[in-house]
Image (cartoon, rainbow, N blue to C red):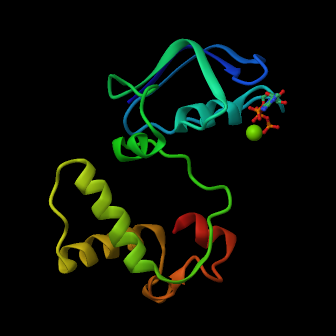
Amino acid sequence: MIEIKNLHVKIAETDTMILNGVDLTVKAGEVAAIMGPNGSGKSTLSYVMAGKEDYEVTEGDILLNGQSILEMEPDERAAAGLFLAFQYPVEIPGVPTMNFLKAAMNSQRKARGENELTTPEFIKQVKEAAGRLGISMDMLKRSLNTGFSGGEKKRM
Ligand SMILES: Nc1ncnc2c1ncn2[C@@H]1O[C@H](COP(=O)(O)OP(=O)(O)OP(=O)(O)O)[C@@H](O)[C@H]1O
Ligand SMILES: [Mg+2]
């Protein structure tokens, strides 16, 4: 669950206030879509949640499962489960998709104090997730995102 409480945010360098008291609660399993005019602060909100530099929270808080994330680094937020998806996922030729997924998954597990997965366990989980997302085994055998369509990259 994410709770945003009375969030006030300014651009650190220029003191320009961008967000002036945002409240939002998203419960586990819910999907929230934030809509608003250009320049109303949607991207700013997602950057602040992900922990991008350049912004300063002057009032309010962001809680992930009851715990404030404001003092956490972006990688710590990611390990806790909060991450900003890439608008344009990068292609990494030469890095097999499966190696990348395994490294990412095991670093998450390590951060949670869990054991690394064995290769058979890992492959089982990848196959399940790939099946749900309509990602073929052929795609998993290629280099990370290399030559994938825009939609395929997003699903990957
Ligand atoms: N570094 C900055 N310096 C000054 N103003 C900024 C800076 N970054 C963002 N802003 C301003 O903050 C406001 C909110 O921008 P933001 O990108 O969050 O809007 P948005 O809701 O995502 O808009 P869009 O629908 O166009 O994507 C805008 O007026 C923008 O110009
Ligand atoms: Mg935007």
Q: Where the N terminus falls, by quadrant?
A: top left
Q: Residue at x 43, y 26 (%)?
A: 71
Q: Position of residue 63 (x, y in %)?
A: 41, 23
User: Going by the image, does 148 lie left or right of 14?
Assistant: left
The answer to whether residue 49 is above or below residue 108 is above
The answer to whether residue 107 is above or below residue 79 is below
Q: Residue at x 56, y 52 (%)?
A: 85
Answer with the quarter of the image where residue 132 lies. Answer: bottom left
Q: Position of residue 121 (x, y in %)?
A: 19, 74
Q: Position of residue 59 (x, y in %)?
A: 56, 10
Q: Position of residue 136 (x, y in %)?
A: 46, 83
The front one of 126 and 119 is: 119
In this view, the residue farthest toward the front is 13
User: Going by the image, does 43 lie left or right of 58?
Assistant: right
Q: Residue at x 33, y 76 (%)?
A: 127
Q: Residue at x 45, y 79 (%)?
A: 97
The answer to whether residue 6 is above or below residue 140 is above
Write down which quadrant ligand 1 falls in: top right
